[in-house]
Image (cartoon, helix red, strand yellow):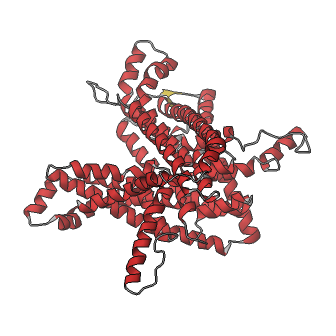
Amino acid sequence: MLASGAVALLVLAPLLALAWTAAQGSDGLWSHLAAYVLPRAGLNTLLLLAGVGTLCALLGTGSAWLVTAYDFPGRGALSWALLLPLAMPTYIIAYAYLDLLHPLGPVQTALRGVLGIASPRDFRLPDIRSLAGCILLLGFVLYPYVYLTTRALFLTQAGSLLEAARSLGVTQAGLFRRVALPLARPAIAIGMALALLEALNDIGASEFLGVQTLTVAVYTTWVTRSDLPGAAQIALGMLVLVLLLVVLERYGRRRQRYATAQRPRPMAPRRLRGAAAACALALGLLPVALGFLLPAAYLLHASLARLRSHGVSPQLLDSAGNTVWVATLATLATVLAGLVVAWALRLAQARRRPGLAAASLRVASLGYAVPGTVLALGLLLPLSVFDVGAGTVLRAFGGEPRMLLMGSVAALVIAYMLRFLAISAGSTEAGLARVPASLDQAARSLGEGSGGMLRRVHLPLLRPALAAGALLVFVDAMKELPATLMLRPVNFETLATWLYADAARGAYEDGAIAALLIVLAGLLPVLLLARSGVAHGRMAAPGGEDANP
């Protein structure tokens, strides 16, 4: 229980430090920020969230309805292919499209060839470096959050209600508008909240596309202007936005429970043939093509070209090694911390005193909602205080004081652990919930203490849950950019920061291999999700509604 409380305090420390730092004042720079930075950054952030939320709701709900309510050739493969954009980090899709849609890039060059126009001055598409371009790109990679939650609801809840509506003469369009859409509102709210938190956390895509958001403002205020209190004050404003998104998610699912006298069952999809089936397949493939296939094909092509001409850079190999090394350490620390808080709750529930342990678990999960930039900024003060204290102790024993955490790999590991602890704790808690309480009682009756019961009974049963949580944490740590940019040691590059540096200096072709490696790693949890989704669909549709994986 003490260890669980310590983990919760560790999560709260950067948030408390952020408030303390913000209260120190901004040395006269705040007036400049308030006059020239914040109005534009705040407006851009609100417009970005509104646009991304709308696009994600349209694409996610529409695609979920398409593959659930209609049956056509290729529907089974499309139902999991719609998850593929989850493997594409936001900064990588921006990186890819910047080169694809460049006036001298392949898309515009091909268009001018078809139209018989020789010069880019005579014909060019609208510049992708804009707020509208940022909304489109983020929407096409973040819509799967809405798709996942909404499709799960359609598969498990909508069947009986839709059949009743059909028997009353409601048309197919009316079924969606009058029954399915109101029913899906809580699921859409949950998916939108997750997508918007990801959009708020984004720094790479916004900066590449020239959109000044609050996240970019926090980074530039600290790094460029060296104004830590000013950056902390902006970060606190972002936390208010995070709180509003959480409230929106809670409000959206306030009527999540549905009462039915019958066993929930999926809807019977309507069979499409001929041109209608082809149109449905093309419509479903459009977000997959724009959100994954096209940028992934570009990255593969650019990587092969780079390999043929220059081979693999030794610095890139070092960055890949650094990425795997720090992600592995962070995964081990995060899985251990998640096990501590989830196990403490299990023991407290057995003693019928779960209050404090449950609160610790909820607090430990806060980090996932906090943008990486804000979390990194909040960690600066606790890390500095630890280093000062450690230096005092070292000096007392005749040692040479030095920075132990600041600017070290340990700082990155701590940041990743706090950011992704919710994944590990949630996965472990779900795994423990599947272990019957009678096993605990049997173990105790045989003389096992808490440690022995965990080691000899629960850990063997928890292996799948721990492995799934570890995989998700490892991949998220590999992709993480904002906190890595702010806390990494000097001359320490990961694949994400390598790509960021290449894109920042306009050397897009050099970062293609790093981007492709990150995307390939991101495919692992997507395959895991698709596999569990297919299993879920089979359970929900015993008659074979979703029998084609």
Horizontally, residue 543 falls left or right of residue 193, namely: left
Q: In the figure, 194 relative to 365: above or below?
A: above
Q: Quadrant of the N terminus?
A: bottom left
Residue, x 60% and y 73% (percent of image)? Answer: 318
**Foreground pick, 542 / 195:** 195
Q: Position of residue 222 (x, y in %)?
A: 59, 57
Total of numbered circles in the picture?
A: 0
**Foreground pick, 212 / 502:** 212
Q: In the figure, 164 relative to 344: above or below?
A: above
Residue, x 41% and y 82% (percent of image)? Answer: 395
Horizontally, residue 445 falls left or right of residue 513, namely: left
Horizontally, residue 194 falls left or right of residue 26, namely: left
Toward the front, the furthest residue is 28
Toward the bottom, the furthest residue is 398
**Foreground pick, 208 / 140:** 208
Q: Position of residue 141 (x, y in %)?
A: 58, 44
Res. 285 image quadrant = top right
**Foreground pick, 349 / 468:** 349
Q: Position of residue 48 (x, y in %)?
A: 60, 38
Residue, x 15% and y 57% (percent of image)? Answer: 440
Residue, x 37% and y 35% (percent of image)? Answer: 543
Q: Is residue 83 visible?
A: yes
Q: In the figure, 336 relative to 394: above or below?
A: above
Q: Position of residue 226 (x, y in %)?
A: 60, 59
Q: Is residue 433 visible?
A: no
Horizontally, residue 93 falls left or right of residue 439, namely: right
